[in-house]
Image (cartoon, rainbow, N blue to C red):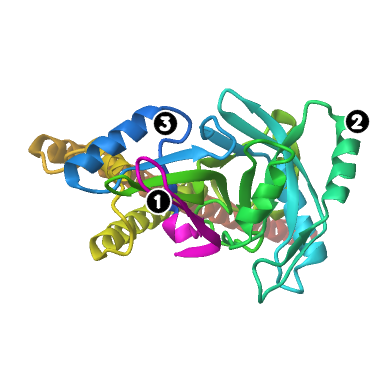
Amino acid sequence: ARTRRGSSRSSSSSSGAIYTTSYVVAPAAVFTATIEPGGGAAAAAAAARADASKFGAPSTTMTPIGGGKLPDEVVIHPIVLLSVVDHYNRVRAGARKRVVGVLLGDVHEGKVDITNSYAVPFDEDASDASVWFVDHSYHEAMFAMHKKVNASERVVGWYSTGPTVRAADIAINDMFTKYTPNPLLVVIDPTHTSALGLPTKAYMAVDEIKAVGAGFSKSERTFAHVLSTVGALEAEEVGVGHLLRDVSDATVTTLATEVAQKSMSLKMLVDKIDELRAYLDAVLAGRLPLNHHIVHQLQDIFNLAPATDVAELRDAFATTTNDQYLVVYLAAMIRSVTALHDLIRNKRELLEQEHEEAAKAAGGGQGGGDGDGDGA
């Protein structure tokens, strides 16, 4: 799951040799690159070292390349997604190559808001990952024009239509460090059609230092996964609502929509559980190293799950289900009685109308006979 790039160098010191290599971590290895996003990095590193010394596993420390800490959250606004999809459809949809652009926004208290973006000319050699081109002169000219329109927006990173992290992304990310200390890489899949999950994944380049033995450590340049969500301002929500009005089905009832949302949520939960199981299986098989921080987070998640084998809980669920079924049964009975009542009432009204029409017909026939007799 790791693609090696660049060269290795070694230097001797009083504590031993330090080996430095550069790597790109594919999404399958994202778990190994996730450690305490947004705070407590020192505490997490100390806990990891303590666990390593206790269990005999190598300790790991991850630091963003520009210093500081990983952001708590990355919020991607809808206009960015629309811009990326438009860029992909205009340039690379037929060629099936990825496109690259610049992300603009703001950083406040560990939260990154990505509010705007624009495309930049990009090309790469499919056979050689080290051969790529980004027109930074075009980027600088575009950013200068954007700065005149909105001075509060600044460069926060870059995007790629991946749909995964590639070997050249570390080098491309290093180029963007000239414009921001810790550029974000947001991988956006414009061909994402599944209703499960988001088509976005955010990463930040970090230096991962691992202790590989007594007096030895290894440094790797890799990407750490950062939590990303899709958010919108009030004005953006109105615009998205108008766009969705054209694609939404007005005939779908509210109940059907709620059931579909519940089903989608359960499918997403099953998908995440499958990812956790795949990671644990890979650790047991030795394909991925053990990360005690991830294991502790999994234990916290499992501790939040309710104990469903308690008799009181089963009785409460049974009582609630029976009450709901009783309401449904009564509603069905009332609906049936109402329908029968309407049927009987309609039948009686039809019979009364028939009797009235028959009486009128009989009375009119008798009156006509008397008139004929008097004339005679």
Residue at 73%, 56% in the rendered image: 100
Residue bearing mark 1? 31
The magenta segment is: 1-29
Report the Cα–Cα distance between label 3 and label 2: 37 Å
- From the viewer's side, name the closer residue of 173 and 117: 173
Q: Residue 56, position in %: x, y? A: 20, 47
| Mark nearer the N terminus (1 vs 2) | 1
Q: Amino acid at mark 2?
A: Lys
Of the residues tagged 3 and 2, which is closer to the observer?
A: 3
Report the predominant secondary structure element of the magenta stretch: strand
Q: Amino acid at mark 1?
A: Phe
Give how far apart the Cα atoms at labels 1 and 2 are. 41 Å
Is 311 a magenta residue? no
**Disc 2, SS:** helix
Rendered residue at 29%/48% (across/down): 58
Q: Circle 1 — which element?
A: helix
Image quadrant where residue 317 sits: top left
Q: Which residue is mark 2?
A: 148
- Observer-nearest of 207 and 144: 207
**Residue occupied by mark 3:** 41
Looking at the image, which residue sits at the far left?
311
